[in-house]
Image: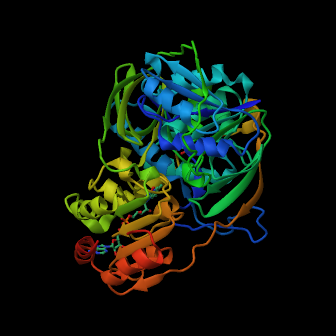
Amino acid sequence: MKILVPIKRVVDYNVKVRPKADESGVDLNNVKMAINPFCEIAVEEAVRLKEGGTATEIIAVTVGSSASQEQLRTALALGADRAILVETDIEVEPLAIAKLLKGVVEKESPDLVILGKQAIDGDNNQTSQMLAALTGYAQATFASELKIEGEKALVTREVDGGLQTISVNLPCIVSTDLRLNEPRYASLPNIMKAKQKPLDVIEAVSLGVDIEPRNKTLKVSPPPVREAGIIVETVDDLVDKLKNEAKVIT
Amino acid sequence: MSILVIAEHDNEEIKASTNNVVTAATNLEGDIHVLVAGSNCSGAKDQAAKISGVAKVLVADSPEYEHCLAENIADLIVAISADYSHILSPATTNGKNYMPRVSALLDVAQISDITAIESSDTFERPIYAGNCIATVQNSDTKKVITVRTTAFDAAQNDGSAEVVDLQESHNLGISEFIKEEIAESDRPELTSADVIISGGRGMQNGDNFKILESVADKLGAAIGASRAAVDSGFVPNDYQVGQTGKIVAPNLYIAVGISGAIQHLAGMKDSKVIVAINKDEDAPIFQVADYGLVADLFTAVPELDAKL
Ligand SMILES: Cc1cc2nc3c(=O)[nH]c(=O)nc-3n(C[C@H](O)[C@H](O)[C@H](O)COP(=O)(O)OP(=O)(O)OC[C@H]3O[C@@H](n4cnc5c(N)ncnc54)[C@H](O)[C@@H]3O)c2cc1C
Ligand SMILES: Nc1ncnc2c1ncn2[C@@H]1O[C@H](COP(=O)(O)O)[C@@H](O)[C@H]1O
């Protein structure tokens, strides 16, 4: 089976980003970039399916500028076999990304597409569901367990009330939640090997879909700041403050 | 044109998040209709009809909607979408699952997790774990929106809407519900609780959460957790508060043995009053706490329990 893993280059999760002073956008000057953590989980899951003998080929794909080749190389170092960059310099929205990914799905005909549930920059949580809608494939989002059983995938999903298990026909679209696996680190030899693996670049325009943004960001502002609080010395003080100052307990 | 709100429910009851979304919808122009899609969902239907501000309740009561499979619900919503300028759902795991599917089928963008409505096409939403608030203007003819429920008060329940039964059947047949493990609890739901006490890695194991339970019993609180506590298996996944878990904003949030990573703060920093109990005085959680107590939780929490 062939697995396609769409990944995204995002600001590293440890960075606390801020709006630009003029509120025209997010200040991304000199911040550390990384592969989106949920995408790392997606790559890891694909690699485990290959190691377990279920998958035969893993293709990592990203939509973005040429800088995203760095994250594709990371995916290759983690175990993807080859990579595709769908190159564009405009900031593409989930709907457009899903349309471009659909183009790649049509070329590659994967049996399984594993995405992250959410990119931690825009916090959209949309692309996998949109790709499922556009391809007509079944979707299994927020996966914490994935088993391939013949022509179906059995997926346990993290939902608000607990866990839900569904069975979906292949080919299908899966999105990863945090508990699906713990991604490995790329070893130095694998990082070296990744440099030799194939990485194709295709122009986004060549896929012939409308990728014009529908949303315009009018401004990006800082969130309301919380007033600095106080340190109480004892549990008695705490209970007193909660009762008599904050009045949140009786 | 009217506004369509997709109800969150368990067939028997409407979830409070539906009421929050109805309040959000009152910031837009047009009648508010609520869709209840489920199976044997007359309980939910009756409650939906009582939500203040709702003009009409549409009911699709059929086995294929029982488990809220995204494919079936999305097709249903698309089939009835023509009359609506805005389609809104709560940003629950259900809403997050079917709404992007709806928007792709309608070829419109989705605006996720909005926290304010400026006009019929302009919305505020947090990005980067809530470290920035983006104001976005959408140019599509139909707006497909998920709503951060903590940003809007819950609508009252003193209305009486007209109820219309839909004869819509949608079953793509490519996915199938197998089973569900839903935790039964007498405690309030995390996302609508007045008081929450959450534990982190500092709790050390699942057994130790008992000391939080005892406090929660006295305060009528829900229990939450950090990702570290969930990943370590102390508590189930549905306890996770944060950027990628549940977003909460209770009157009182007590963080116990939680360091206060960006991703955790993203889920709770809009709480009215925040208390942090942590033995490390440099823990970032103290930067957002109204009341911080630098102490070992294993002595502080039982003491707190005794004094309540
Ligand atoms: C993609 C991604 C998504 C994430 N999403 C979330 C999310 O939604 N929610 C979330 O919470 N995290 C999330 N995280 C994880 C987050 O980055 C932190 O790792 C996590 O919140 C840490 O949990 P913690 O505070 O319990 O653990 P730690 O950071 O290990 O903190 C434990 C704290 O307990 C204190 N402590 C220990 N023992 C005691 C004691 N006896 N008495 C008092 N205090 C004690 C310590 O001083 C310390 O401050 C995410 C991370 C990533 C990469
Ligand atoms: N530019 C992109 N290129 C490839 N995949 C992407 C891109 N953006 C998002 N994705 C995938 O979609 C997932 C969810 O992203 P989002 O819908 O933006 O929250 C990510 O974890 C990726 O797997």
Tell me which corner region of the image, top left, top right, bottom left or bottom right, holds residue B103.
top right
Tell me which corner region of the image, top left, top right, bottom left or bottom right, holds residue B2.
top right
Q: Nearer the viewer, residue A178 or B148?
A: B148
- Coordinates of residue A237 in the picture (x, y in percent): 36, 84
Q: Is residue B264 left or right of residue B108?
A: left
Q: Is residue B245 visible to the viewer in this orientation of the structure?
A: no
- Coordinates of residue A14 in the picture (x, y in percent): 51, 66
Q: Is residue B259 visible to the viewer in this orientation of the structure?
A: yes
- Coordinates of residue B139 in the picture (x, y in percent): 80, 40
**Which quadrant would the C terminus of chain A be assigned to in this image?**
bottom left
Q: Is residue B282 left or right of residue A149?
A: right
Query: Which residue lies at the image location 43% right of the left edge and 23% below the top edge?
Result: B66
Q: Is residue B180 left or right of residue B136?
A: left
Query: Which residue lies at the image location 57% right of the left edge and 77% below the top edge?
Result: A227
Query: Which residue lies at the image location 33% right of the left edge and 50% below the top edge?
Result: B187
Give the tally of numbered discs.
0
State which image quarter holds ligand 2.
Answer: top right
Single out the residue that lies furthest toward the bottom.
A233
Q: Nearer the viewer, residue B287 or B30?
A: B30
- Coordinates of residue A212 in the picture (x, y in percent): 78, 39
Would you place residue B220 above or below residue B52 in this image? below
Query: Which residue lies at the image location 47% right of the left edge and 78% below the top edge?
Result: A245
